[in-house]
Amino acid sequence: MTLGKRQLALASTGTGLTLLIAGPILALALGLPIPLVVVPAVLGFVFMMAGGVLYAMDTEARPAAAVPRDPIALTCPNCGGAAQSIVASGIATCAYCGTRFRVS
Ligand SMILES: [Zn+2]
């Protein structure tokens, strides 16, 4: 889902960049009137903006996906106590017997 949006953003930006650069050059090379030179450049700019917006949306969505899972009920492997506190990432301490253990 996220990958699809990013690929779409990159494709849009790539298309826009190609239009923006190659469009006017091609139009000028063909001796087309100025409006036809400007149109592909404007179109390319719009595509680039769309790609940028899509990419920004994708970037904003990433931290939410990185949020840790919901807290899980931990059980001490030593005494079976239920109340634990995580003192470091992945390390929990039993509130009853003080046993420290890694949370998988
Ligand atoms: Zn314990």
Image (spheres, grey):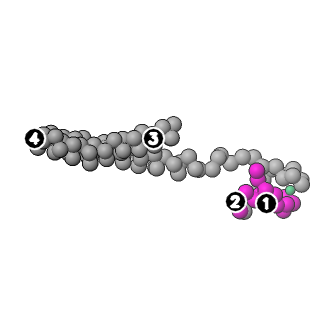
Task: Tell which of 94 and 35 is nearer to you.
Answer: 35
Q: Going by the image, does 56 lie left or right of 30?
A: right
Gap in angstroms between the C-alphas marked 2 and 3 = 33 Å
Q: Earlier in the sequence, mark 3 or mark 1?
A: 3
Residue to which mark 1 is pinned: 93
Counting other residues with Cα less than 10 Å from the Cα at mark 3, is it few (<14), some (14-19), or many (20 or more)?
some
Residue to which mark 2 is pinned: 89
Marks 2 and 4: in contact by CB < 8 Å? no
Q: Earlier in the sequence, mark 4 or mark 1?
A: 4
Gap in angstroms between the C-alphas marked 4 and 1 = 75 Å
Amino acid at dot 3? Gln
Residue to which mark 4 is pinned: 33
Gap in angstroms between the C-alphas marked 3 and 1 = 43 Å
Task: Tell which of 50 and 60 is nearer to you.
Answer: 50
Q: Quadrant of residue 102?
A: bottom right
View quadrant of ligand 1: bottom right
Residue found at x 85% / y 60%: 99
Q: Earlier in the sequence, mark 4 or mark 3?
A: 3
Q: Read off the magenta span.
A: 88-104
Gap in angstroms between the C-alphas marked 1 and 2 = 11 Å
Residue 28: x, y in percent? 16, 45
Counting other residues with Cα less than 10 Å from the Cα at mark 1, is it few (<14), some (14-19), or many (20 or more)?
many
